[in-house]
Image (tube, grey):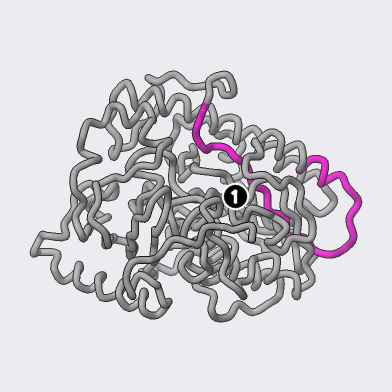
Amino acid sequence: MPTRPDIFIIHGHDLGDWLSCYSMASIPSPNLHALAERSVVFDAAFAAAPLCTPARSALFTGLLPHQNGLMGLTHDGWRYAPGVRTLPEHLRPLGYRSVLIGLQHEDFDARALGYDEVHGLGFLPRAMEVARRVEWWCDQPRDDAPTLVTIGMWEVHRPWPREDYRRAEPADVDVPPYLPDNAATRDDIADFHGAIRQMDEAVGMILDAIDGSDRGREAMIIFTTDHGVAFPRAKSTLYDSGVKVAFIVRPPAHLDVSPGRRSDLVSHLDIVPTLIELAGGTPSAPLEGRSFLPLLAHGDTGADRRLVLEKSFHDRYDPIRAVRTRSAKYIRNFQDDVRLPLPIDLEESSTRSGMGDWPNEPRPPEELYDLDRDPWELENLAADVEYDVLREDLARALDADMRRTEDPLVRGAIPSPDVPSRA
């Protein structure tokens, strides 16, 4: 049996944890549900950031966005900082070849990311197109080198046109408590279900292709997404709805890991150190994450880990930092703004039309949530004197982490990247 298995990372877009295996029974995701039943499902997995490029940068480098340089969208001019190593570059010295199929959102040119093979250079590869390309790749002759394959798809990013996706019945969908339960929201979620359904069908094709290949059943398979769902008060925020992600890991058979669920906090930052260890290497500084191989093998530790979350730029400057533990979330808003500065696709959504004016109310400088009592983060306790000790403790922890990681926000406002020039 191989000690260095092939590794497949399948990643979607704007999904959060909206899957039937994450207690949303109405979601049409039977293939991912079946994968979850034979895998380890992490119930408390988080992106490091709530938007596309920064979130993926953390996933593929093991560094926070302000450490790796991708603090905003790559098509707005953000680039990896000099010397930053991507996952394929970490695994190459350990004998791994690397392949990119479909979507990436880290650089205009995917060939700059360190892959040995790149199939699809665009930002918008659709799920079924990607699945067919994976089927083709799995049929190609290969040498004996272990291989990292990252597989990215556009779905389930907005828009969700009805001519492309088979929508659900609005009356049958689940509406989370942070959204208004009205006809406008249900109509929007019904369209969203159609995109999830098609993504799930593509994932089913991808999994069949992997398992049908010579080494597929011995492979490590990871399914995740970049960040939270594309709804107001989710994507582009540091609430759990903006950073909590689906995270399903099917370990290679030789590790002899039983299917099950894990409740320990894990981060996308953990993927790089985990795969370095799986490949026979030793993760080392400056990586921010930690290997989750012990969690796969031995189950939960019960430790109260502290995760740092960040946002700097989306379609505008919006500096926010947060600390998340098992039971609490502390958010610091560094700039006066409206409560929910929405990107254009969310501002124009059906859901937004039914929300009234509260997204445009002033935002507080600090937010604190008791997640045991208020898992949806609806009651801000930052001004509650009974929570002063907790707020001050988490505020100090955030300050310490920002200094330790040399967050540029410590020094003041972060400038936008230079405008590209042809000179």
Q: Is residue 273 above or below residue 233?
A: below
Residue at position x 33%, y 23% in the image: 184
Q: Give the residues in magenta.
A: 134-160
Looking at the rendering, which quadrant does residue 340 occupy? Answer: top left
Q: Which residue is at the far left?
A: 385
Query: In the image, residue 85 lies at what x, y percent?
Result: 63, 71
Foreground residue, 135 or 156? 156
Query: In the image, residue 218 lies at what x, y percent?
Result: 75, 56
State left or right for residue 85 relative to residue 270: right
Q: Residues within 10 Å of mark 1 (few under 14, many from 20)?
A: many
Label 1's element? strand
Q: Is residue 95 above or below residue 8?
A: below
Foreground residue, 21 or 65? 65
Query: In the image, residue 81 lies at what x, y percent?
Result: 56, 70
Residue at position x 44%, y 42% in the image: 229
**Does residue 151 show up magenta in the picture?**
yes
Foreground residue, 149 or 408? 408
Q: Is residue 4 above or below residue 353?
A: below
Count of all numbered marks drawn on residues in the image: 1
Residue at position x 33%, y 66% in the image: 413
Foreground residue, 220 or 119? 119
Q: Which quarter of the image is occupied by the N terminus?
A: bottom right
Q: Which quarter of the image is occupied by the C terminus?
A: bottom right
Looking at the rendering, which quadrant does residue 273 occupy? Answer: bottom right
**Does residue 269 show up magenta in the picture?**
no
Give the residue at mark 1.
223
One can see residue 8 in this view: no
State left or right for residue 384 relative to residue 311: left
Query: In the image, residue 250 lies at what x, y percent?
Result: 63, 53
Looking at the rendering, which quadrant does residue 5 occupy? Answer: bottom right
* Amino acid at dot 1: Phe
One can see residue 304 in this view: yes
